[in-house]
Image: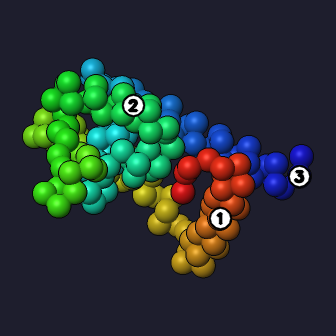
Amino acid sequence: MNKQEQVMLDFRDLFNKMAWLNKSKMEESLKGHKPSEVHCIEAIGKNAEPNVTKLAESLYMTRGALSKLTKKLMEKGLIESYQKPDNKKEIYFKLTKQGEDIYNIHEKLHQEFQERDQAVFEQVTEEQFDSMLRFIEAYRRHLNAEIKKQGIGIH
């Protein structure tokens, strides 16, 4: 196995271990909410003026799938839609109090997981971080170019 294959295998393994470790606590704390719903709530909470297009792009979903998801979240009372007085065409979303509660639980869990893993990151030098971030950014640019070539509407 060459180093490129090893890096990709190790990235997948790390991601899968994190997901496995975090899964039961996430499911227990966010009972009754699917991961896609929680991720949509997170995207609404983190994006300024989130609309269908912005959310679909940030969640790597089609606009149609995102519309179904936001409809379900509105039915559950977790988000509301609104329009700006100067733009009656575009629909935006915001969290309700109940949606904010889910958002805050999710953020708190991420903070816990970050604290759990902090011992590893404390050992990483600035140069190592910079090197990893350069690699990730170069790979991201490559994947974005590939996505653009295929005509998929994702940033």
Residue at 54% in and 78% down: 126
Counting residues from the start of the chain, the first of labels 1 and 2 encountered is 2
Q: Residue furthest right?
A: 1
Q: Nearer the viewer, residue 71 or 42?
A: 71
Q: Which residue is mark 1?
A: 141
Type of amino acid at the residue the image marks with label 3:
Asn
Q: Which residue is mark 3?
A: 2
Foreground tag (1 vs 2): 1
Residue at 58% in and 36% down: 16
The quadrant in which residue 79 appears is top left
The numbered mark at residue 125 is none
The answer to whether residue 138 shows anywhere in this view is yes
Q: CA distance from mark 3 to mark 1?
A: 23 Å
Residue 6, position in %: x, y?
79, 49
Counting residues from the start of the chain, the first of labels 3 and 1 encountered is 3
Q: CA distance from mark 3 to mark 2?
A: 34 Å
Residue 155, position in %: x, y?
54, 57
Label 1 sits on a secondary structure element that is: helix
Q: CA distance from mark 1 to mark 2?
A: 27 Å
The answer to whether residue 104 shows anywhere in this view is no
Vertically, is 10 above or below 128? Answer: above
Q: Are there few (<14), some (14-19), or many (20+) residues within 10 Å of tag 3?
A: few
Type of amino acid at the residue the image marks with label 1:
Arg
Type of amino acid at the residue the image marks with label 2:
Pro
Counting residues from the start of the chain, the first of labels 3 and 2 encountered is 3
Q: Which residue is mark 2?
A: 35
Q: Are there few (<14), some (14-19), or many (20+) residues within 10 Å of tag 2?
A: few
Please report contact status of discs 1 and 2: CB closer than 8 Å, yes or no: no
Label 2 sits on a secondary structure element that is: helix
Q: Nearer the viewer, residue 121 or 41?
A: 41
Residue at 28% in and 29% down: 71
Vertically, is 23 above or below 139? Answer: above
